[in-house]
């Protein structure tokens, strides 16, 4: 049997709303043409309460799929137990088979698969909740067993919560585990754990320059094949500067944007600025307008900012007062320079007011 595996369509994602529908359609329709059924591992929609227009377009999309679709909800769709989430609406419209702590058996040509799905659970409860849900799981005799999740996996994405681990997943009584949530496609445990990744860019990370698409899993061969879909090109570039002026930064950014748009005029472009500016310039002095689908991440002078933050943290740990911190900073700036005043006295005069500070300096001439 051939199973189409899709996840994280994020229909209605506001930054790239049209892309979310177009690219989800390509993945779902492509899988439907080649497979006996589709499993969608959550975050079909981008929000818990999508706009009516988003729901309508989503329902129209799923209404055109001619093979059964089994789906769970993701963290973007999760609502409290008493409330309806948007994936349940697709069930109500008879567009998907909805799974949460439940299983379904699909049979074709004498072959059976059993799909057990668990919608997204907060990471701190995930391991315990999965263990509890599996107590009610009754394996179907002779069936190829699949677990569908939408969770953080500690070996891949680390948080401070009690997440699931690959070691934990490896010991579960399933032939295949499909996981959503992680937007980068990957295969773990020799292909037992599959993450198809998202079908639309949402995080503007370097990983998202990789192809997007869906898996086809062959249950007899026990092998997965990743099928890329046509997507809008995403460039993630980095420009490095050393003691540069504002004009030099602007010039290089313009040239890089022009170069990338010559390769693909409709591309999404993110440019990260790193390095240092000329003395006296702050990163905030370099204001670059973000245009449609062009994003600038300004990390210029980041080392200086980090040093200042570390110094502030050190002062805080030493429990220095605001006055003591300011005096230390003033002394540091005046280090090696000839002055006729004490930094601590000058600071106290500054606190009194500019006229008092000027009068103090006049007296020290």
Image (cartoon, rainbow, N blue to C red):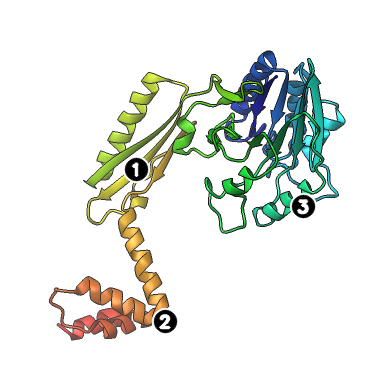
Point out the image quarter for the N terminus: top right
| Residue denoted by label 2 | 319
The span from disc 2 to disc 1 (Cα, nearest Å) is 35 Å
The span from disc 2 to disc 3 (Cα, nearest Å) is 47 Å
Dividing the picture into quadrants, the one containing residue 183 is: top right
The span from disc 3 to disc 1 (Cα, nearest Å) is 48 Å
Dividing the picture into quadrants, the one containing residue 68 is: top right
- Using the image as rendered, state which of residue 266 and residue 174 is in the foreground: 174
Q: Are circles 2 and 3 on residues that touch, CB within 8 Å?
A: no
| Residue denoted by label 3 | 132
Q: Is residue 290 visible?
A: no
The x and y percentages for residue 268 are 47, 29
SS assignment at label 1? strand
- The residue at the point 19 percent across, 86 percent down is 363
The x and y percentages for residue 63 are 78, 20
SS assignment at label 3? helix
Dividing the picture into quadrants, the one containing residue 145 is: top right
| Residue denoted by label 1 | 273
Disc number placed over residue 89 in the picture, else none: none
Dot placed on the residue nearer the N-terminal end, 2 or 3:
3
């Amino acid at each position: 049997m051939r199973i189409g595996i899709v996840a994280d369509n994020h229909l209605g994602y506001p930054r790239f709303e049209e892309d979310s529908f177009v690219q989800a359609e390509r993945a779902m329709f492509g899988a439907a043409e080649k497979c006996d059924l589709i499993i969608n591992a959550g975050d079909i929609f981008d929000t818990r309460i999508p706009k009516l227009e988003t729901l309508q377009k989503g329902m129209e999309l799923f209404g055109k799929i001619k093979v059964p679709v089994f789906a769970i909800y993701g963290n973007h769709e999760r609502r409290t137990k008493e409330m309806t989430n948007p994936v349940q609406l697709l069930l109500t419209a008879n567009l998907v088979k909805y799974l949460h702590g439940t299983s379904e058996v699909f049979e074709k040509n004498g072959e059976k698969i059993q799909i057990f799905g668990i919608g997204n659970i907060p990471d701190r409860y995930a391991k315990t909740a999965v263990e509890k849900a599996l107590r009610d799981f009754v394996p179907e005799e002779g069936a190829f067993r699949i677990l569908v999740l939408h969770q953080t996996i500690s070996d891949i994405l680390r948080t401070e919560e009690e997440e699931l681990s690959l070691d934990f997943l490896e010991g579960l009584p399933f032939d295949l585990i499909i996981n959503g949530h992680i937007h980068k496609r990957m295969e773990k445990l020799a292909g037992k754990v599959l993450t198809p990744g998202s079908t639309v860019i949402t995080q503007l990370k370097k990983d998202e320059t990789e192809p997007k698409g869906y898996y086809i899993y062959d249950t007899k061969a026990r092998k997965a094949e990743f099928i890329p879909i046509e997507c809008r090109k995403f460039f993630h570039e980095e420009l490095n500067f050393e003691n540069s002026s504002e004009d030099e930064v602007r010039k290089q950014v313009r040239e890089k944007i022009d170069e990338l748009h010559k390769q693909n005029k409709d591309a999404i472009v993110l440019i990260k600025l790193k390095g240092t500016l000329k003395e006296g310039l702050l990163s905030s002095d370099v204001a670059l307008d973000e245009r449609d689908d062009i994003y600038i991440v300004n990390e210029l002078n980041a080392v200086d900012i980090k040093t200042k933050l570390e110094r502030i943290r050190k002062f805080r740990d030493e429990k220095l007062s605001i006055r003591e911190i300011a005096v230390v900073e003033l002394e540091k700036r005046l280090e090696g320079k000839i002055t006729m005043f004490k930094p601590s006295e000058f600071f106290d005069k500054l606190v009194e007011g500019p006229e008092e500070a000027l009068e103090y300096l006049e007296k020290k001439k």
